[in-house]
Image: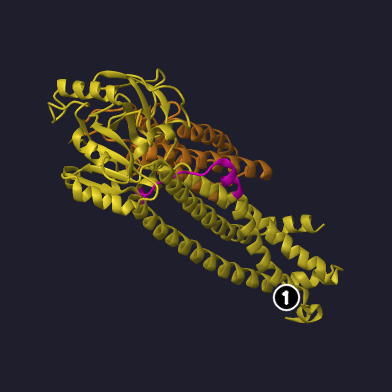
């Protein structure tokens, strides 16, 4: 039987959010750039989020060519990696000490919000696919 | 029965349901995010007002050429300027001056905790009437040599030691948030500041090579005696004490308050515009939907559903979509305002302190209730129209 490979709203959302995470952490909400060219802990937190973002984007593209059952499998990965992206800056890898610095005001909240949205979207997708059977 | 049928109706038309949920989401998002922002700004202003403590702030004339004294509280001034202590004594002897307290500023080049300069502020615990009342919200002990109080925006290392100019300072307390530059400052007694000044001079990082904390001050905080007019005392100091500028502390706040009023009005207008737009769209969409479903309602009437039940069905569907959309809007607003409060504060340039959990919960429930009430009012109008439909006429249409 031919599998249904229709691209749904959640598939598109996961791709947009994953790309947003990868591109955003390298541009719009990249961590602090020190004047002397040195790297702080926040730089490496940003790199880790970038890695997770790229992996999620690749997975989001790949899932467009997968059947429904395989997409359910990737949902679990999106939930885990979304949570990881949210927890990396400030949680698993430290950031600058001052709460007013760019990494604390932009990189951390943006990663948190996008990570949570990715995990929630994947959870909703998993739930909907579970109901459809 | 109505509940089950409503759920089936909503699930049967996912596109239509999603559109109605989205509209409700806009409503609750705008009211919750907007009100939370205004409330946080108000809380920031109140906190700053409570923290000010002094009626007049006297700084050397030289300081006014470096920055705007009125915006000192919000922008901070990681720099230093000094005035001979004799000027502080002159200020203290002016009529109407009840108490004075001196502060000494020093900017660190970089603290061990972060990579930007922080403002180090030395104060005299004996005469102070601004820092200690603030510190006593979190700390009741003595502030000895080498002890520092830090603003809420400075992260304290696990060992509780911050290093400035290679001098270790023990953090004894973190101060409550004000949403201003005061949150990024470090406070110490005069002996500690003197040690830090000497350390900065030894490292060649202080442009003033020959100053001593015993001889100079950076600012003099003045409390005006009861019965005296603050403006008159300020003018008297400006007139009779040379090389200094006296500024009313309330003037600093009034500038912030004026800006806050402007921002609050703008946010209010924005919320109103979104509400008007969303309500009009919701009204049009519901009216069109009801027209589209006239035959469905007529069949339900023929099958024995009363007019009251039909109205109940419309109301239940509206309540469900508004509840779902309202909750999603509140959650989305929380996901934007809470994590990005630092950016909002920096962009608005105003003190921003998020309210406590109880007030946030009340605001969230209020926003949800407002969204539900608006949806209920619109669907009540539609339900009234539905209850007046002529079943036979509708069923004969198209035959």
Q: Position of residue B66 (x, y in %)?
A: 18, 44
Q: Could you tell whether B320 is left or right of B23 in the image?
A: right
For the N terminus of chain A, the image quarter is: top right
Q: Write down the residue under mark 1.
A: B385
Q: Which chain is orange?
A: A
Q: How far from the left and from the top, in percent, is residue B308?
A: 81, 68
Give chain B's shade: yellow
Looking at this rendering, what residue extends furthest in the right direction?
A: B304
Question: In the image, is residue B165 above or below residue B55?
Answer: above
Q: Quadrant of residue B107?
A: top left
Q: Is residue B348 magenta?
A: yes
Measuring 65% from the left and 57% from the top, which residue is drawn there? B321
A80 over B201 or under it: above or below: below
Question: In the rendering, at what x and y percent does residue A18 appear?
Answer: 44, 41
Q: Quadrant of residue B119?
A: top left
Can the viewer see residue B82?
no
Q: Is residue B118 magenta?
A: no
Magenta-drawn segment: B347-362
């Amino acid at each position: 039987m031919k599998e249904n490979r229709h691209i749904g709203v959640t598939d598109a959302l996961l791709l947009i959010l994953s790309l947003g995470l990868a591109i955003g952490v390298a541009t719009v909400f990249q961590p602090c750039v020190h004047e002397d060219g040195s790297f702080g802990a926040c730089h490496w937190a940003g790199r880790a989020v970038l890695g997770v973002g790229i992996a999620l984007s690749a997975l989001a593209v790949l899932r467009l060519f997968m059947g429904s059952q395989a997409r359910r499998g990737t949902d679990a990965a999106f939930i885990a990696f979304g949570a990881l992206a949210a927890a990396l800056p400030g949680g698993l890898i430290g950031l600058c000490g001052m709460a007013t610095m760019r990494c604390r005001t932009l990189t951390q909240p943006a990663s948190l919000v996008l990570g949570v949205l990715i995990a929630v979207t994947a959870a909703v997708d998993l739930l909907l696919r579970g109901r459809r059977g | 029965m109505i509940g089950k049928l409503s759920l089936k109706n909503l699930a049967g038309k996912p596109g239509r349901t999603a559109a109605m949920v989205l509209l409700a989401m806009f409503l609750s998002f705008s009211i919750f995010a907007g009100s939370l922002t205004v409330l946080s700004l108000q809380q920031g202003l109140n906190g700053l007002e409570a923290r000010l403590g002094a009626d007049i702030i006297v700084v050397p004339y030289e300081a006014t050429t470096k920055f705007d004294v009125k915006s000192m509280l919000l922008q901070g001034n990681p720099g230093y300027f000094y005035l001979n202590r004799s000027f502080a004594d002159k200020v203290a002897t002016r009529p109407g001056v009840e108490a004075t307290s001196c502060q000494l500023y020093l900017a660190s080049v970089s603290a061990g905790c972060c990579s930007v300069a922080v403002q180090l502020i030395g104060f005299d615990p004996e005469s102070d009437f601004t820092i200690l009342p603030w510190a006593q919200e979190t700390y009741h002990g003595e502030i000895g040599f080498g002890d520092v109080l830090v603003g809420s925006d400075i992260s304290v290392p696990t060992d509780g030691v911050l290093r400035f100019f290679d001098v270790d300072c023990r953090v004894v307390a973190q101060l409550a948030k004000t949403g201003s530059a005061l949150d990024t400052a470090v406070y110490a007694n005069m002996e500690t500041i003197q040690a830090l000044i000497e350390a900065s001079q030894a490292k060649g990082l202080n442009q003033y090579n020959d100053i001593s904390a015993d001889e100079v001050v950076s600012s003099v905080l003045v409390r005006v005696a009861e019965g005296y007019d603050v403006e008159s005392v300020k003018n008297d100091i400006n007139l009779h004490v040379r090389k200094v500028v006296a500024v009313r502390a309330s003037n600093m706040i009034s500038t912030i308050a004026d800006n806050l009023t402007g921002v609050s009005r703008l946010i209010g207008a924005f919320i109103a515009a979104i509400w008007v737009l969303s309500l009009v769209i919701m009204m049009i969409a519901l009216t069109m939907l009801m027209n589209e479903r006239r035959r469905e309602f007529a069949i339900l009437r023929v099958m024995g559903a009363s007019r009251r039940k039909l109205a109940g069905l419309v109301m239940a569907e509206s309540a469900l979509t508004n509840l779902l959309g309202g909750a999603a809007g509140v959650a989305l607003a929380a996901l934007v305002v809470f994590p990005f409060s630092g950016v909002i504060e920096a962009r608005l340039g105003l003190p921003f302190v998020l309210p406590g959990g109880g007030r946030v919960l009340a605001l969230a429930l209020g926003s949800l209730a407002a969204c539900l009430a608006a949806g209920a009012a619109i669907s009540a109008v539609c339900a009234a129209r539905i209850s007046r439909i002529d079943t036979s006429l509708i069923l004969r249409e198209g035959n």
